[in-house]
C-alpha cells in the first residue's frame, strides 16, 4: 500500500512537470499553429537563470527571475523569429529547431556541458508520512505548483479578455482578426506564457532532479510532446489529464517492470490512443 | 438495374443533420443533376459517396456491392470517379505527369520504383486522354500554372484516366467564364453520352443542367426534395420556392 | 447619387497557387443601401471580399473613404469600421453566445440594445455554446457581433446560405434594417433576397466584372440573370 | 554537359585517396592521410543519410522527427550481431537493414494514422524510446552511454586498422552512390511522381484510386532501409555505435542538412549533408581555438540554419537556381507545407 501511495505521488509529481511543459506547447500550437521545438530551451533558460541568480538574490527571487527570463525568451522568439514567417508553418518549425540547437549549445558554452547542483528549499528534502508511505516533500511542491497553474490558467482563459481571444483564436484565427482584434499580440502572449510555464517546469525539475544540465529540457520535451498529442492539441484540460495518465503509467511500470519499460509503455499508450482516436482525447482535428 | 444506390444515408455533425436520410438510385447510362441552394449538403453527399466521409447511418452500394465502409481509393478502383468543387490537381507535376499518375493508379504500377517514367502504353493513353479534353497543347506545363478553366479540364482528364463507371462531378462549371462553358459542356457530353457511364453532377448553371440531365434531384437542408425529369422539377412549386427563393 | 462611393475597387487581382483568381475586378460601393455582389459559384465573390479585407495577397487598388487600404492588416480595417460577416458565419463553436458577442466588442458602449431588439433569442441563449445553435441562430450571432459596434461599411458573405425559408426571411429583414443605417456589400445567391434588399448589383464572372448597374434592372432581365447567374425560370 | 558533372565528381572522389595534396585550413593532414579520409568518409555517410531522409521530407512531404531511430537500428544492429554474436559483416548488415525496414513498417503503420505535425511528434516519441533503450543498456547489449565499440575480429581484414581507412572511405563513397542511385531511380520512376502527387494533394491521390496510407508507408519503409544502411556504414567508419546516433539531435541535424542543401531537389540534401558533417567535425576540432559560443559546433550550425531559412529559402540548390533562373526546370518546389 505504502509503495502504491509513493508511486502515485511520484508519478503525479512527474505529471506536474509534463503538464507545465505540455500546456504551454499545446496553447502555442493551438493558437499560432507552431510546433515549438525551442520550448525545451525555454525550460533550460528558466533553470539556468535561477541557478545562477540564487546565490545573489536568494531562492524566491531567483525563481521569479528564472520564470521572467524564460517568459521573455518566449516572447522574443515569437517577435523576432516566428512572426516574420507569418503563415509558413514548416519554416516556423524549422526555425525553432535551429533555435533549439543553437540555444542549448549557447547555454553549454556559457555554463558547461556538465550537470550543476540545483538549489532547493530546505523543506523540500524532508519527507511526510502519507498512509504509511514516506513521501519526499518535493513531490507536493511539484503537484501543488501544477494544480495552482492549472487553476490559474483555466481562470485566465475563462474570465479575461485575452483568455477569450486565445480560446477563440485556437478555434479560428482568421475570424478573430476579422473582428478587429490583433491576434498577433495574443501569439506573443501565449509564447510568453508558454515560456514562463516551461521556465517554471525547468526550475521545479531542477529541484526534483537536484541538478540541471543543458540537455535536460529536450528529454522532458519529448514526453511533453507525447502528452500534448494524447491530450489533444490546444486543450489545457486535455494536457492535464494526459499528463497525469502518462506520469502515473511511467512510474508504476518503471517500478514493477524492467528498466526503461515505463518509457516504452508511455509510447505504447500513445500508439493505442492514436489507433483509437487520432485527434487525441480532447482534440480538435489534428490534421489540418 | 442500379449502378449507384444511396440508401437512407444521413450524416450529422453533433445533432445537426448535414445530409438527411437521402435515398437515390442511378441506372446505367443515366445522367442525374443534383441541385439545391448553397449549403444544402450537395458536396457533403459527394464526400459520403466517394468515401471521404463515413455516413452516420444508411448505406451506399456500387454495382450492387455495399461500399459504405470502404476507403476512398477502394471505391475509386471499383469504378467510382469524382472531381472537386475547387480544382484539385497535382500542382507541381506537369499536365502529362498528372494524367500518367492517374492512368497508372488505375492500371497498377504507380508505386513502381525502378523503371523510368512511364510505359509506352501509359504515355499513349495519357496523350489520348489529353486530346479528349482538348488539353494536349499544355502537356508539358506544370499543372499549378494552368488557367482555371484548364485546371477544370485536367480534373476531368484525371477522372477519365480512372475509366470510371460512375462519375461524380462537383460543379464542373464553377469559375469557368461564360464563353468557355459550351466547350466544357461538350467535353462532359462526350465522356458520358453512349459510353454506358453514369453521372451524378452538382451544378448551379441551370442551362447546363437542363441540357445534360435525364433527371434532376433537388437537395435542400440535406434532404432530397424531389427527383424527377427536368421539366417536372422546374414546374414544382415547392422546388421553386426552396431553390430559387421565389415568393419571399 | 452624386455622393462619393464608400469603397472603390479598381483592378483588383488575386493570384493563388499559380492561378489567377481575380483578374482586375473594378466596381464601387454606394455610400448607402445594399450593393449586391453576384455571380456563380467559383466566380470570385468571396475572394473579392477577402482581398478587400486584406486576408489574401492582392494587387490593384481598394479605396475606402478615399484612402488606399490594400495591404493594411485586417484587424485595422475592421477597427476603422469595415465589418465582415464571413461565409459559414465564423461563429466560435466552443464559446458561449455571450462570449462570442463579448469578443466582438470594440467600443466602450457596445449597442446591446439594438442586438437584443433584433435578436431577442440571443439574450435567452447567452450561456449556450454557439456550436449547439441552429444554423439560423448562428447567423444571428454572426450578424449581432458586427452590429455591436459602429460601422461604416458591412461586408456580408452569403448570409442565407443553408437556412430554412422562414429564417431566410428573418435574416433579410434584419439586413434591410441594418442597411438603413450603414452601407452593405452583400454576396448572395438567393435572388429573392437580392431583389428585396439590393439597390446596385455587380456580377463577377471568372474573376472579372461582367455586369454593373441597378439591381432591379438585372433581375427584371430574365435573359441576363440566366446567362450571368445561371439561375432563373425557363 | 552539366549532367557529366556528378560523374566527374564521383571519379575525383574515388581517386582522391591517391592524392597527397595538402589543403591547409580545410584539412589537418594531406588528403590521403587516415585522419582526413575518415573525416571525408563521415561526410559521405551523412550525404547519404541526408539524401535518404529527403526521400521522406522533400519528396513525400513527410516531416518525420524520428529518422535517427533507423540509423541507430543500423549502427547498433550490425554492431551487436558482430560484436556480441560473432556474425560476419555481410550477413549482419543484410539482416540489420531488413530488420530496420520491418521495424519501420510496424511503427510507420501506427504513426501514419496521424498527419502533419502530429505525425512529427509521434515519430519523435517512437525514436525517443530507441534512444532511451540504447542508453539503458538492456542485457548489456548496447553498452549504455559509453556506446558499443565494434569488435574488429568479426570484420574483414580490409576494413581493420588505420592503414585500411582508405577502404572505409571507399565503402562510404559506395554507400553514397547506392543511396543516390536508389533515390534518383525513385525520382524518375512512377513512384517519384506518385510521391510528389501525394505531397500536392493527398485527397486527390485517394480518389484516383491509390491508398495514400500505403504509399506513405512504402516511403517510410524505403527511407528506413536507406537510413539503416547508412547507420551500418557509419558504425564501420567510426568503429562502433554510440547513443548519439539514436538521439533526436541527429534527426534534427538531418532536417537541417536537407533544408540547408535544398529539400526535394536532386542534389540538395546530399550536398547539405556533406557540408553539415564537414562543418560539424571541423568546428568541433577547432572548438578550443574559437571564442565563446563559436566553439560550439551546434551553435554555429543552428544559427546558420536559422539564417538560411530566412535568407536562402530553397537552400544551396535554390541559390544555384536563382543564379541561373532559366535552368533547372525539373527542380520541385522546395519546402513542402507539412502543417
Image (tube, coloured by chain):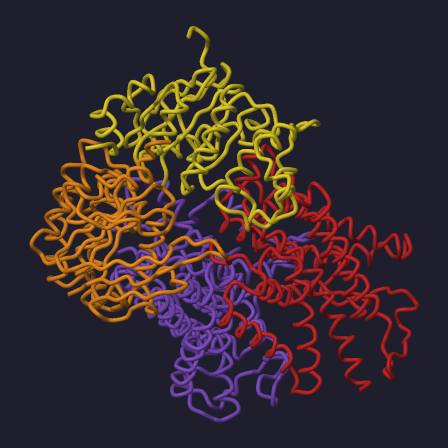
x 70%, y 52%: residue: A195
Q: Is residue A70 visible?
A: yes
Q: Quadrant of residue A216?
A: bottom right
In the depicted view, which residue is nearer to us: A4 or B170? B170
The x, y position of residue D53, in whole percent, is 43, 64
Q: Which chain is purple?
A: D
Chain shown yellow: that is: C
User: Looking at the image, which is closer to me, C95 or A15?
Assistant: C95
Residue D41 image position (x, y, % from top left): 45, 69
Check the rendered structure and report the hue given to chain B. Answer: orange
In the visual, does D19 lie left or right of A62? Answer: left
Q: A150 or A99, which is in the foreground? A: A150
Residue B214 at x, y = what percent? Answer: 15, 49
Q: Classify residue A83 by image quadrant.
A: top right
Q: Which chain is red?
A: A
Horizontal side, residue D50 vs residue A250: left or right: left
Q: Is residue A207 above or below residue A160?
A: below
**Picture layout, residue C140 above or below residue B47:** above
| Residue at image coords 52%, 40% | A174
Amino acid at each position: 500500500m505504502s509503495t502504491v501511495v509513493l508511486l502515485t505521488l511520484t508519478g503525479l509529481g512527474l505529471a506536474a512537470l509534463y503538464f507545465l511543459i505540455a500546456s504551454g506547447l499545446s496553447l502555442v500550437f493551438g493558437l499560432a499553429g507552431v510546433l515549438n521545438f525551442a520550448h525545451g530551451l525555454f525550460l533550460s533558460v528558466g533553470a539556468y537563470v535561477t541557478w545562477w541568480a540564487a546565490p545573489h538574490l536568494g531562492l524566491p527571487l531567483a525563481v521569479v527571475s528564472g520564470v521572467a527570463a524564460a517568459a521573455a525568451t518566449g516572447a522574443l522568439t515569437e517577435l523576432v523569429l516566428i512572426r516574420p514567417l507569418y503563415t509558413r508553418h514548416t519554416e516556423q518549425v524549422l526555425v525553432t529547431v535551429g533555435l533549439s540547437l543553437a540555444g542549448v549549445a549557447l547555454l553549454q558554452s556559457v555554463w558547461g556541458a556538465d550537470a550543476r547542483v540545483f538549489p532547493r528549499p530546505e523543506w523540500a528534502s524532508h519527507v511526510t508520512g502519507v498512509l504509511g508511505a514516506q513521501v519526499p516533500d518535493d513531490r507536493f511542491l511539484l503537484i501543488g505548483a501544477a494544480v495552482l497553474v492549472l487553476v490559474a490558467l483555466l481562470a485566465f482563459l475563462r474570465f479575461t479578455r485575452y483568455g477569450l481571444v486565445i480560446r477563440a483564436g485556437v478555434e479560428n484565427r482568421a475570424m478573430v482578426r476579422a473582428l478587429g482584434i490583433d491576434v498577433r499580440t495574443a501569439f506573443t502572449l501565449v509564447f510568453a506564457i508558454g515560456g514562463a510555464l516551461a521556465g517554471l517546469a525547468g526550475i521545479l525539475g531542477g529541484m526534483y532532479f537536484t541538478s540541471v544540465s543543458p540537455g535536460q529540457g529536450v528529454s522532458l520535451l519529448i514526453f511533453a510532446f507525447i502528452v500534448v498529442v494524447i491530450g489533444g492539441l490546444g486543450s489545457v484540460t486535455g494536457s492535464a489529464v494526459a499528463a497525469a495518465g502518462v506520469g502515473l503509467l511511467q512510474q508504476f511500470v518503471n517500478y514493477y517492470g524492467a528498466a526503461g519499460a515505463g518509457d516504452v509503455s508511455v509510447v505504447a499508450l500513445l500508439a493505442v490512443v492514436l489507433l483509437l482516436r487520432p485527434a487525441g482525447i480532447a482534440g480538435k482535428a489534428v490534421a489540418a | 438495374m442500379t449502378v449507384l444506390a444511396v440508401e437512407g444515408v444521413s450524416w450529422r455533425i453533433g445533432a445537426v443533420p448535414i445530409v438527411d436520410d437521402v435515398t437515390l438510385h442511378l441506372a446505367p447510362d443515366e445522367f442525374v443533376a443534383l441541385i439545391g441552394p448553397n449549403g444544402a449538403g450537395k458536396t457533403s453527399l459527394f464526400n459520403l459517396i466517394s468515401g471521404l466521409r463515413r455516413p452516420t447511418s444508411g448505406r451506399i452500394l456500387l454495382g450492387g456491392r455495399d461500399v459504405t465502409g470502404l476507403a476512398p481509393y477502394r471505391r475509386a478502383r471499383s469504378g467510382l470517379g469524382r472531381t472537386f468543387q475547387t480544382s484539385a490537381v497535382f500542382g507541381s507535376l506537369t499536365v502529362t505527369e498528372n494524367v500518367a499518375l492517374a492512368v497508372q493508379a488505375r492500371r497498377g504500377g504507380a508505386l513502381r520504383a525502378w523503371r523510368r517514367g512511364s510505359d509506352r502504353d501509359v504515355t499513349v493513353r495519357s496523350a489520348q486522354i489529353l486530346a479528349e479534353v482538348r488539353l494536349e497543347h499544355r502537356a508539358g506545363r506544370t499543372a499549378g500554372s494552368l488557367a482555371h478553366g484548364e485546371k477544370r479540364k485536367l480534373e476531368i482528364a484525371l477522372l477519365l484516366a480512372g475509366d470510371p463507371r460512375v462519375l461524380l462531378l462537383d460543379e464542373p462549371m464553377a469559375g469557368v467564364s461564360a464563353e468557355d462553358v459550351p466547350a466544357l459542356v461538350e467535353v462532359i457530353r462526350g465522356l458520358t453520352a453512349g459510353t454506358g457511364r453514369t453521372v451524378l453532377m452538382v451544378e448551379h448553371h441551370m442551362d447546363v443542367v437542363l441540357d445534360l440531365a435525364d433527371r434532376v434531384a433537388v437537395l435542400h437542408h440535406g434532404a432530397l426534395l424531389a427527383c424527377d425529369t427536368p421539366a417536372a422539377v422546374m414546374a414544382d412549386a415547392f422546388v421553386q420556392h426552396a431553390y430559387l427563393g421565389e415568393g419571399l | 447619387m452624386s455622393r462619393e462611393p464608400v469603397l472603390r475597387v479598381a483592378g483588383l487581382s488575386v493570384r493563388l497557387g499559380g492561378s489567377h483568381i481575380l483578374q482586375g475586378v473594378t466596381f464601387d460601393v454606394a455610400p448607402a443601401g445594399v450593393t449586391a455582389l453576384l455571380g456563380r459559384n467559383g466566380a470570385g465573390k468571396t475572394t473579392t471580399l477577402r482581398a478587400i479585407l486584406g486576408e489574401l495577397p492582392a494587387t490593384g487598388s481598394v479605396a475606402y473613404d478615399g484612402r488606399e487600404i490594400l495591404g493594411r492588416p485586417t484587424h485595422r480595417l475592421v477597427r476603422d469600421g469595415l465589418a465582415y460577416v464571413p461565409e459559414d458565419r465564423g461563429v466560435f463553436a466552443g464559446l458561449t453566445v455571450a462570449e462570442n458577442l463579448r469578443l466582438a466588442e470594440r467600443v466602450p458602449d457596445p449597442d446591446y440594445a439594438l442586438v437584443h431588439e433584433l435578436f431577442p433569442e440571443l439574450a435567452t441563449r447567452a450561456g449556450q455554446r454557439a456550436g449547439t445553435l441552429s444554423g439560423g441562430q448562428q447567423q444571428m450571432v454572426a450578424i449581432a457581433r458586427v452590429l455591436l459596434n459602429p460601422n461604416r461599411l458591412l461586408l456580408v458573405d452569403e448570409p442565407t446560405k443553408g437556412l430554412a425559408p422562414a429564417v431566410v426571411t428573418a435574416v433579410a429583414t434584419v439586413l434591410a434594417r441594418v442597411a438603413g443605417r450603414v452601407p452593405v456589400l452583400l454576396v448572395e445567391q438567393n435572388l429573392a433576397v437580392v431583389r428585396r434588399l439590393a439597390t446596385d448589383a455587380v456580377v463577377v464572372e471568372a474573376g472579372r466584372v461582367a455586369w454593373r448597374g441597378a439591381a432591379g434592372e438585372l433581375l427584371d432581365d430574365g435573359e441576363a440573370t440566366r446567362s450571368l447567374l445561371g439561375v432563373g425560370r425557363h | 554537359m552539366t549532367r557529366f558533372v556528378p560523374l566527374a565528381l564521383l571519379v575525383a572522389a574515388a581517386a582522391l585517396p591517391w592524392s597527397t595534396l595538402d589543403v591547409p585550413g580545410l584539412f589537418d593532414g594531406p588528403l590521403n592521410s587516415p585522419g582526413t579520409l575518415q573525416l571525408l568518409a563521415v561526410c559521405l555517410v551523412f550525404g547519404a543519410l541526408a539524401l535518404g531522409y529527403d526521400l521522406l521530407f522533400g519528396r513525400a512531404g513527410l516531416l518525420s522527427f524520428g529518422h535517427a531511430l533507423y540509423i541507430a537500428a543500423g549502427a547498433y544492429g550490425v554492431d551487436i550481431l558482430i560484436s556480441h554474436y560473432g556474425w560476419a559483416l555481410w550477413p549482419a548488415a543484410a539482416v540489420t537493414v531488413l530488420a530496420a525496414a520491418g521495424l519501420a513498417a510496424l511503427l510507420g503503420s501506427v504513426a501514419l494514422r496521424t498527419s502533419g505535425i502530429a505525425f512529427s511528434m509521434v515519430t519523435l516519441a517512437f525514436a525517443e524510446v530507441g534512444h532511451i533503450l540504447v542508453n539503458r543498456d538492456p542485457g548489456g547489449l548496447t553498452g549504455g552511454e559509453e556506446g558499443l565499440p565494434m569488435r574488429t575480429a568479426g570484420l574483414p581484414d580490409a576494413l581493420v586498422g588505420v592503414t585500411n581507412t582508405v577502404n572505409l572511405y571507399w565503402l562510404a563513397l559506395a554507400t553514397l552512390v547506392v543511396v543516390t542511385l536508389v533515390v534518383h531511380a525513385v525520382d524518375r520512376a512512377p513512384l517519384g511522381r506518385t510521391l510528389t502527387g501525394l505531397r500536392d494533394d493527398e485527397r486527390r491521390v485517394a480518389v484516383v484510386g491509390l491508398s495514400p496510407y500505403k504509399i506513405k508507408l512504402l516511403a517510410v519503409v524505403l527511407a528506413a532501409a536507406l537510413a539503416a544502411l547508412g547507420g551500418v556504414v557509419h558504425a564501420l567508419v567510426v568503429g562502433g555505435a554510440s547513443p548519439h546516433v539514436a538521439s533526436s539531435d541527429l534527426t534534427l541535424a538531418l532536417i537541417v542538412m536537407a533544408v540547408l542543401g535544398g529539400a526535394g531537389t536532386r542534389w540538395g540534401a546530399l550536398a547539405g549533408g556533406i557540408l553539415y558533417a564537414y562543418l560539424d567535425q571541423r568546428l568541433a576540432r577547432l572548438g578550443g581555438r574559437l571564442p565563446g559560443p563559436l566553439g560550439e559546433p551546434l551553435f554555429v550550425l543552428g544559427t546558420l540554419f536559422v539564417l538560411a531559412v530566412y535568407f536562402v529559402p530553397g537552400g544551396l540548390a535554390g541559390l544555384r537556381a536563382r543564379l541561373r533562373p532559366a535552368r533547372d526546370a525539373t527542380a520541385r518546389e522546395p519546402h513542402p507545407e507539412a502543417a
